[in-house]
Image (cartoon, grey):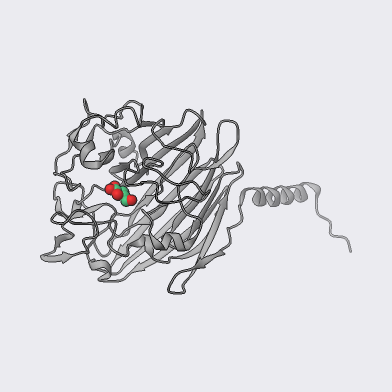
Amino acid sequence: MKANIPPSLFSAVLYLATTTFAFCAEPPSAKPFGKTKEGAVVEVFTLVNKQGVKLRAMTYGATVLSLETPDRDGKNADIVLGYKTLGLYEKSSPYFGAIVGRYGNRIAGGKFALEGKEYNLAQNNGAPGSKCSLHGGLRGFDKVVWKAEGLAQDGAQGVRFSYLSKDGEEGYPGNLEVKVTYWLNDQNEWRVDYEMATDKATPVNLTQHSYFNLKGEGRGDILGHELMLPADKFTPVNAAMIPTGELRPVAGTPLDFTQPKTIGARIQTDDEQLRFGGGYDHNFVLKRPLLACLLGRRTYPAATVYEPLTGRVLNILTREPGIQFYTGNFLDGTLTGKAGASYPKRSGFCLETQHYPDSPNQPAFPSTILKPGKVLKSTTVFQFSVK
Ligand code: BGC
């Protein structure tokens, strides 16, 4: 017997089915990327959108391996620095594309006190006599294998990385559960959602450590990129790159990017802060627009970068109070990138959304202490466009 479906109901069902399938992307699947020296399997996920943007990320360090975006003529290039093989990441990487934690940036002397107890971390950075802990210690979140699952939403593909950092790992207190989710949507936005919970009070400051070159990785320096940072102040450092505690106005200094300026325009200026950093390597205090705060907006502007030759624009939004602007001052041409070109000094820049450096020792800075019973959520969005 033939079912008697009224044509209007039939078209409604058909419409629903096609629109549902049209909007709901498929979750990306895991593909093997390699094995660590200890034999752990590392997988890679490829997120793609309708505009041809493609982001590849692996479970070692939740690291972004490549990010292809179009220029103003619609031609794609990979705009992040990185290596071809897992072995090279394991051997030595200046945190290319990784999630940095438990504490991104520096902690003076590798020491902090919390709830009456002193904690000692590995001093993995700095000159003898002024050593500090950098980016989570000897084996930070960039050097561990995360669990991962592919996700899909209307108009977006994602991958959720999770990692349990055990009580005492790298000297930090508390079992810290971390989830970092990357979303790539059809509006050319790469969104990074962070979620953390602990069973003992601990400092936490995660960041995404991609090195960008909007001309394409391996295609020379980043000095011609124009940068705008909505920051009236920065946290000046001493010769050991530790904040002095001051929030200093950028006005009248080469760190003033409140109006767009090329990165190279003032980088050679004889300025104490640029000398200490070997270029830009500073945390900027982001202005939080009052309206955005009142409206409870989840993110607010953090940086805009424009590359005039290709027309690529990178716009960054965040919930974090600061952003570390680093101009690849320690790259020296000895590392070879994915396409076979070496990475000389200033061939990539990082814009790391974060809390301020050394906050566990700076009571006046916004707190980085996560307490049990709280879930810490943060979001940073990287938007790609052309002009
Ligand atoms: C820091 C630099 C450091 C680099 C490591 C950046 O986040 O600000 O000082 O050298 O990471 O590659």
Determine the image quadrant of residue 373: bottom left
Residue farthest to the front, as pictured: 334
Q: Residue at x 18, y 40 (%)?
A: 236
Q: Is residue 32 left or right of residue 356?
A: right
Q: Quick check: 4 left or right of 305? A: right
As drawn, which residue projects farthest toward the left?
Answer: 116
Residue 106 appears at what percent x and percent y? 23, 53
Residue 296 in picture, x, y percent from top left: 34, 42
Q: Position of residue 325 (x, y in %)?
A: 31, 41
Q: Residue at x 88, y 60 (%)?
A: 2
The residue sitting at 38% across, 33% down in the picture is: 223
In this orientation, which residue lies closer to the viewer: 49 or 137? 137
Circle count: 0
Q: Nearer the viewer, residue 11 or 205?
A: 205
Quarter of the image that includes the N terminus: bottom right
Residue 153 in sight: no
Q: Name the image quarter holding residue 174.
A: bottom left
Give the farthest residue toward the right: 1
